[in-house]
Image (cartoon, rainbow, N blue to C red):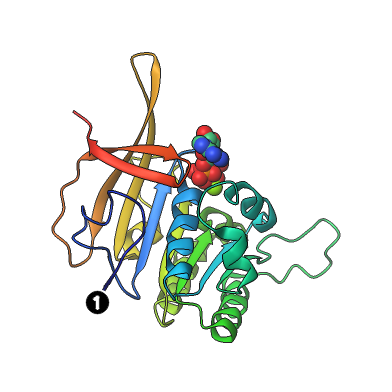
Amino acid sequence: MRIKIGIKGFDDVIHGGLVKNRIYVLSGPPGSGKTTFGVQFLAYGASTGMPGLYVSLTRGAGTTLENMSGYNMNIPVLTGRDVLFFRDVKSVPDYADSDTSISPSIVYAEILDFVNRHSIKRLVIDSMSTLRFSINDQTSKDMEIGRFIQNLSLLDCTTILISEMVDPSTYSTEQYACDGLVFLHNFMRGRSMTRAIQIIKMCGTAHDCEMRKLEFTADGLRISGKIV
Ligand SMILES: Nc1ncnc2c1ncn2[C@@H]1O[C@H](COP(=O)(O)OP(=O)(O)OP(=O)(O)O)[C@@H](O)[C@H]1O
Ligand SMILES: [Mg+2]
């Protein structure tokens, strides 16, 4: 079964939406629209009967809620009705913390508890790059990320994992382990900045890998034609 993301112009490109209960990764450079994409996906779901949870691993959930409330996504109403949640989950210890026992499994346990208590159906985790900071043992980083994703796949949720794109020529564990991978791009064309979106892989869907124009509007992101 497919579910609509709710971003104008994008659901059509992937033949009606995302395959439900799979894990997707959204990667892009700073300011490319990753958080906006994730919150728009949640707000659309929440307004169509699928409760959503935005998890900030940088303790920035309040800031995100404030930033995104300016868009016509009905966010204050949805959060007020308890169908859309913005939550911080600690992934990095404070200087004052004597207890530094934070790990992906502890982060997962907190998410699992919240998902069960509020019947969450759409989940966004921002970001995987931050989750890596919770792994002390350098040698087990990839394995820990793999286990985290494997456990997320047991949830009755459609999940978007946000990951910062550091080096587009090397892929991370979550980019391999996920069911779908979408890149956002910022680049100069002549003298102006162009934003684009590109599907790298998408389970169960025939798709091209063309870059499409991505615009910020009062309603959030909108995707238009191919960039030629
Ligand atoms: N109405 C608006 N409100 C907020 N941001 C807007 C608006 N219109 C356009 N923008 C653009 O959205 C960008 C931020 O988008 P977003 O936070 O989704 O990006 P991001 O990829 O998550 O960034 P980061 O890597 O810093 O987390 C801003 O840099 C700004 O250029
Ligand atoms: Mg962001």
How far across and down, in percent of the image, does residue 18 sit? 29, 65
User: Which residue is depicted at the point 68% across and 69% down?
Assistant: 102
Task: Quadrant for residue 181, please give it.
Answer: bottom left
Quadrant showing the C terminus = top left
Residue 118: % across, % down: 57, 82
Give the percent coordinates (x, y) of residue 14: 21, 57
> Residue 20 in the image: x percent, y percent?
31, 74
Rendering quarter of residue 201: bottom left
Mark 1 closeness class: few <14, some 14–19, many ≥20 residues within 10 Å: few
- View extreme (left): residue: 206
Whether residue 135 is visible to the viewer of this picture, yes or no, is no
Q: Amino acid at mark 1?
A: Met
Q: Nearer the viewer, residue 11 or 181?
A: 11
- Horizontal side of 95 relative to 142 (left or right) equals right
Mark 1: C-beta under 8 Å from nearest atom of ligand 1: no
Q: How many marks?
A: 1
Question: Where 12 falls versus 46 (above or below)?
Answer: above
Q: In the image, is residue 102 above or below residue 221? A: below
**Quarter of the image where the N terminus is located:** bottom left
Position of residue 43 in the picture relative to residue 211 (left or right): right
Residue drawn where x is 43% and y is 63% of the image: 44
85 and 58: which one is in front? 85
Q: Which secondary structure lies at badge 1?
A: loop
Residue that extends furthest to the top in the rendered view of this protein: 191
Q: Is residue 216 visible?
A: yes
| 21 versus 137 height, above or below | below
Residue situated in front as seen by the camera: 202 or 9: 9
Instruction: Tell me what residue is drawn at x 40 percent, y 53 percent.
Output: 26
**Residue beneath disc 1:** 1
Quadrant of residue 65 within the rendered picture: bottom right
